[in-house]
Image: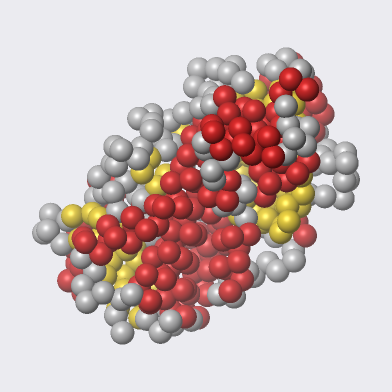
Amino acid sequence: MKHIAIVGAGQAGLQLGFELLAKGYEVTMYTEKTAQEMLNATSMPAPIQFYPSLALEEKHLLNFWGNERDSQVDASSFCSCSPDGRKQLEIKASLHVKAKSIDLRLKYAIWLEEFERRNGNLIIEGGSIDLLEDCTLKYDAVFVATGKNRLSTVFERDEERSSFNAPQRHVAHFYLADCQFTYPHHPDWNTAYFIQIPGVGELILFNSLHKSGKKAFSLAVEAIPNGALDLFNNRGDGTSQLEILKGYAKKNQPGFYQIIKDSSLVNNDWLYGAITPEVKKPAGILPSGRVVMAIGDALTTYDPIAAQGLNAASKSAHHVAKWIYTNEPARFNEKWINEVFGDYWNKARYNVLYERSFLNLRQRHQKLIFIAASHIPAIASEFINGMGDPSALAPFYFDADATASYLKEHGFSLKAVE
């Protein structure tokens, strides 16, 4: 049985470790933080995780939150509003299987402890080129699940699969208490609320289980650079930045302002930054000529806008794990890495295309789907329940001819609603 090394203990790294441990592999994990240091770390975004990847966690007994109500998301609502707050269209539907949102500091801290309980070998050491070189000598295969620091240079950018050369949004994230947030059609539902303001950005709000163990609201502000919502900077404290947002909302988005006007920051938990969405080549060639493989964030970085990052990382880890234990190679060489990635990309490309449709103004046929979904509940349900696996939306969401056929089958005519 092979001895596998994983550098980086986020969603992809830890999940790959757990799946390989379950198959009897010896696994060594390198990470820069202990479980306690992870729990005490500065704020991280609170992503929504959908069922296709949640099912993997349930299978491997990693769902330590069970039916914890504060972590569950029952439904989603997409609303397009004009810059002065007038609603232009809305799509809403319940999720067939509840999604979850958990503070990643809490999740990863518990998973790090569990990894050791399951006889994984945990080493607290930050990633570096020298570490990777050393690992390639000591282990049968090395997987890199973090692109931080110098490790970002190990994997070459895939120009063919990457669409952006710069961040498309400036992102602020707040953990809030005391939001006045109910879903009018089903007041008992926990609902993810997505407001798109064309030419300005997006406001995304949903409940989340905070690391304190209490319910909080995760608010992501996706601002088009230099636009009206690009209000924040790292020089201010979180409370002052939240007040700036409230001032903007009161003037420009009064409906949203009513939700957040009495809110307060939880534990000063906020962050501000920007991500360039990018796909890397999966095989990293070290100075020695030895090879390592990228998974998760080291392979593909996503803007948080379309909730693809964590879900894609989970699928990446599972795909690689399955290839290892069902088709273990004699050598984990570049040829094997590229073959694994090629098979993975057949579905993963839809995650990237889906994200791109949110970051760019949607193509005409995708705009038609949104209009149709605001009128036909069955289309709304199919679209919203496809967020966790955008390949399920192929081909109708990604191909104009398929869109035309799909809308015709559902009896939608643009002229009928104009």
Quarter-wise, where is residue 200 in the image? top right
Q: Is residue 227 above or below residue 321?
A: above
Q: Quadrant of the C terminus?
A: top right
Q: Point out residue 394 in the picture as x, y percentages from the top left corner.
A: 54, 45
Q: Residue at x 28, y 66 (%)?
A: 142
Q: Quadrant of the N terminus?
A: bottom left
- From the viewer's perspective, tell me whether residue 309 is left or right of residue 2: right
Residue with the most extreme left position: 288
Q: Nearer the viewer, residue 100 or 402?
A: 402
- From the viewer's perspective, tell me whether residue 61 is left or right of residue 88: left
**Total marks placed:** 0
Quarter-wise, where is residue 270 in the image? top right
Q: Say if residue 272 shows up in the picture.
A: no
Q: Residue at x 46, y 65 (%)?
A: 318
- From the viewer's perspective, tell me whether residue 178 is left or right of residue 397: right
Q: Say if residue 141 shows up in the picture.
A: yes
Q: Is residue 137 above or below residue 276?
A: below
Q: How is the image coloured?
A: secondary structure
- From the viewer's perspective, tell me whether residue 16 is left or right of residue 76: left
Q: Residue at x 67, y 31 (%)?
A: 370
Quarter-wise, where is residue 182 in the image? top right
Q: Residue at x 66, y 43 (%)?
A: 383
Q: Is residue 197 above or below residue 41?
A: above
Q: Point out residue 368 in the picture as x, y percentages from the top left corner.
A: 64, 28
Q: Point out residue 206 in the picture as x, y percentages from the top left corner.
A: 71, 44
Q: Point out residue 178 in the picture as x, y percentages from the top left corner.
A: 80, 42
Q: Nearer the viewer, residue 248 or 72?
A: 72
